[in-house]
């Protein structure tokens, strides 16, 4: 019998038992979707994670480990060990090798969201993803001391619109009992979603942060020392210090030279880190957990394949008459065994196809919600070689596990002696 005929017989057999095998295929489809989804999300999240900041050559802050400096400046997690003096920032500005500087001042919050004090340099030079600039969905960047720009998720979560007044809180915790009630800020802009920590932040001017802390030198409001917005505008609002600075080097070949000099800065202890190197180290630490998750999901697929074996072995008891008829018409024991393997592979290929379609539909449906709710930017893209390898491994595994019922069918068919059996 030809391969085409064997394939036709396998399809006919699968269709005849479609009700039982459909449940097995569904289980296998879901497990493959889970495995493929974990790998897909792992790749996309890593890409999004890596693209959180781009185009920045160095991040400068007080002396600390590079992961700590990266976490509080880029991801707004944790706190700085110390600030850097404003005079130091000005010296960096005077360095002819440095093309641009973006000051970052942290310490306050708004309903659990980090308040970032910065300047007009932030929307001009900060980049994420593939050299993308943070764009305003509506309004404009702050121009005055008591104006604020909200990240996309901050505005959505709290329902803020242009012109709303908000009160910032002292300290970086989610709950604060020390609020700057005397100096409210007016919302002048809302940023478009970026899928980065930018969406979770609130942006004000450095002068604005100085203004709201007049009378808060001891960490709490001192009665009689705090000022109104009008009074604050009459003061010198030049910051005494900032938390960190993003640095762009004019000639990239000088990046390591500038980094060494900043790390050896004599006036105060500083750290200058390469964002890409720090991100790679952070992902390497986190990679152990996602690899373990991928392995657990792989075991789910293996379990589904074992279930397929169990079903096929159970069905063999119902196929004795079918096997006897095939043997009587000239089918060899090898062909009988091959039918089981072909059926396993066909079911695996069908499950893989359904898994790809299901996964694509799920990503297309959930990606807008993930971006809006969690700030995770995941979109449809062609499968990468690793994902194709995962898909190809499932039919191969099905072929191997199909040899078990095939071997049993081969042994059973050799013992049957209906009619005149054509020799192998």
Image (cartoon, grey):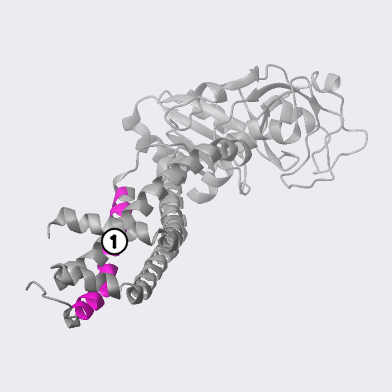
Q: In the picture shown, does residue 401 fall above or below 190?
A: below
Q: Residue at x 38, y 54 (%)?
A: 351
Question: Measuring 23% from the left and 80% from the top, which residue is drawn there?
Answer: 412
Q: Quadrant of the C terminus?
A: bottom left
Q: Residues within 10 Å of mark 1 (few under 14, many from 20)?
A: many
340 relative to 170 in the view: left or right: left
Q: Is residue 274 visible?
A: no
- The answer to if 409 sits in the magenta stretch is yes
- Judge whether residue 56 is colored magenta: no
Q: How many marks?
A: 1
Expressed as whole percent of the image width and height from the top left, the position of residue 72 reads 58, 44
Residue found at the very far bottom of the displayed protein:
415
Q: Is residue 408 visible?
A: yes
Q: Quadrant of residue 340?
A: bottom left
Looking at the image, residue 273 sits to the left or right of residue 347; the answer is: right
**Most foreground residue, 140 or 375:** 375
In the image, is 416 to the left or to the right of 220?
left
The image shows residue 401 at horizontal and vertical percentages of 29, 69
Q: Which residue is mark 1?
A: 343
Question: In this view of the protein, which residue sits in the foreground, 69 or 266?
Answer: 69
- What residue lies at 29% left-to-right and 61% top-to-bottom? 343
Q: Secondary structure at mark 1?
A: helix
Q: Which residues are magenta?
A: 388-413
Position of residue 350 measured from the top left corner of the image (x, y, whole percent):
35, 52
Viewer-closest of 292 and 216: 292
Image spot of residue 358 (x, y percent): 46, 46
Q: Is residue 316 left or right of residue 41?
A: left
Q: Main secondary structure of the magenta part?
A: helix
Res 314 → quadrant? bottom left
């Amino acid at each position: 019998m030809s391969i085409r005929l064997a394939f036709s017989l396998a399809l006919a057999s699968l269709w005849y038992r479609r009700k039982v095998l459909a449940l097995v295929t569904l289980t296998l489809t879901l497990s493959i979707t889970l495995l493929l989804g974990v790998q897909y999300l792992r790749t996309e999240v890593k890409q999004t994670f890596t693209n959180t900041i781009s185009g920045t050559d160095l991040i400068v802050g007080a002396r600390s480990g590079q992961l700590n400096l990266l976490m509080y400046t880029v991801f707004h997690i944790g706190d700085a060990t110390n600030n850097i003096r404003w005079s130091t920032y000005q010296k960096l500005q005077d360095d002819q090798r440095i093309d641009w500087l973006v000051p970052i001042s942290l310490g306050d919050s708004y309903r659990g969201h980090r308040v970032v004090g910065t300047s007009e340099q932030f929307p001009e030079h900060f980049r994420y993803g593939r050299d993308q600039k943070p764009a305003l969905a509506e309004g404009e960047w702050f121009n005055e001391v008591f104006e604020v720009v909200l990240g996309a998720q901050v505005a959505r979560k709290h329902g803020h619109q242009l012109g709303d007044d908000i009160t910032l809180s002292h300290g970086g915790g989610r709950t604060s009992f020390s609020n700057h009630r005397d100096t409210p800020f007016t919302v002048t802009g809302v940023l478009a979603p970026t899928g980065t920590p930018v969406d979770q932040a609130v942006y004000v001017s450095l002068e604005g942060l100085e203004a709201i802390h007049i009378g808060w030198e001891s960490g709490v409001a001192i009665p009689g020392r705090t000022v109104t917005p009008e009074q604050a505008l009459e003061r010198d609002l030049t910051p005494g210090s900032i938390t960190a600075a993003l640095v762009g080097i004019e000639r990239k070949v000088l990046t390591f030279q500038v980094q060494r000099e900043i790390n050896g800065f004599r006036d105060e202890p500083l750290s200058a880190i390469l964002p890409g190197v720090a991100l790679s180290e952070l992902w390497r630490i986190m990679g152990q957990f996602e690899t373990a998750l991928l392995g657990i999901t792989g075991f789910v697929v293996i379990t589904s394949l074992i279930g397929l074996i169990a079903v096929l072995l159970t069905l063999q008891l119902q196929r004795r008459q079918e096997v006897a008829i095939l043997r009587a018409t000239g089918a060899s024991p090898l062909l009988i065994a091959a039918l089981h393997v072909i059926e396993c592979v066909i079911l695996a290929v069908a499950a893989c196809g359904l898994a790809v379609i299901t996964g694509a539909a799920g990503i297309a449906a959930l990606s807008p919600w993930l971006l809006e709710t969690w700030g995770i930017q995941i979109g449809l893209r062609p499968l990468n070689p690793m994902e194709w390898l995962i898909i190809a491994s499932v039919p191969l595994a099905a072929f191997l596990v199909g040899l078990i019922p095939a071997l049993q069918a081969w042994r059973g068919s050799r013992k049957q002696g209906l009619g005149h059996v054509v020799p192998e």
